Amino acid sequence: MTRLTLHTTGGDDPEITHALRDLLAPPADERYWSELEARIMARVPEASGWWGVFDSWMRPALVAAAVLMLAAGVALFRGEQADQQLAYESILTPNAPVSAEASLRPGVQEREATLGFFLSH
């Protein structure tokens, strides 16, 4: 058995410490622990019934997960197709090239002109 250690901040009072140790000490009788274990194990089947509800949810949850994965795959595929289409159109559509120097105007700094050049494409 482990001995209960009490730490008090108001000084040590031996009577209170002894009374609390007696009050909080674990039972020394082995029958107490055996009976406690038997009571807990008797209640386990009753307590384990609450997660049985999830068994009925398993099939719909798996179907929903499969549908979501399929939808995510379709969305990714469509997004990739749209990106490829935009890339092809930007390559095949003739654009007049605009240089960064051509976008410089009096009073506009070079950094702003560069940003304007990239944003215009």
Image (cartoon, rainbow, N blue to C red):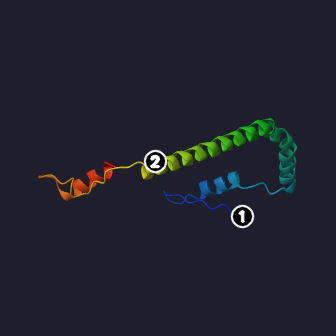
Relative to 85, say whether 9 is above or below.
below
Residue 111 appears at what percent x and percent y? Answer: 23, 58
Query: In this rendering, does residue 54 appear at all?
Result: no
Residue under numbered circle 2 = 89
Task: Locate the N terminus and report the quarter of the image it occupies.
Answer: bottom right
Q: Amino acid at mark 2?
A: Glu
Q: Distance between the Cα atoms at labels 2 and 1? A: 79 Å
Q: Amino acid at mark 1?
A: Thr
Quarter-of-image position of residue 30:
bottom right
Q: Residues within 10 Å of mark 1 (few under 14, many from 20)?
A: few
Horizontal side, residue 87 vs residue 44: left or right: left
Marking on residue 24: none
- Give SS at disc 1: loop
Horizontal side, residue 55 vs residue 78: left or right: right
Residue 49 appears at what percent x and percent y? Answer: 82, 38
Residue 65 appears at what percent x and percent y? Answer: 70, 42
Marking on residue 2: 1
**In front here: 47 or 59?**
59
Relative to 42, say whether 24 is above or below.
below
**In front here: 113 or 40?**
113
**In front here: 22 or 56?**
56
Q: Residues within 10 Å of mark 2 (few under 14, many from 20)?
A: few
Quarter-of-image position of residue 3:
bottom right
- Give SS at disc 2: helix
Residue 24 appears at what percent x and percent y? Answer: 69, 53
Q: Determine the residue located farthest toward the bottom in the rendered image.
A: 2
Query: In this rendering, does residue 65 appear at all?
Result: yes
Task: Tell us which disc is closer to us: 2 or 1.
Answer: 2
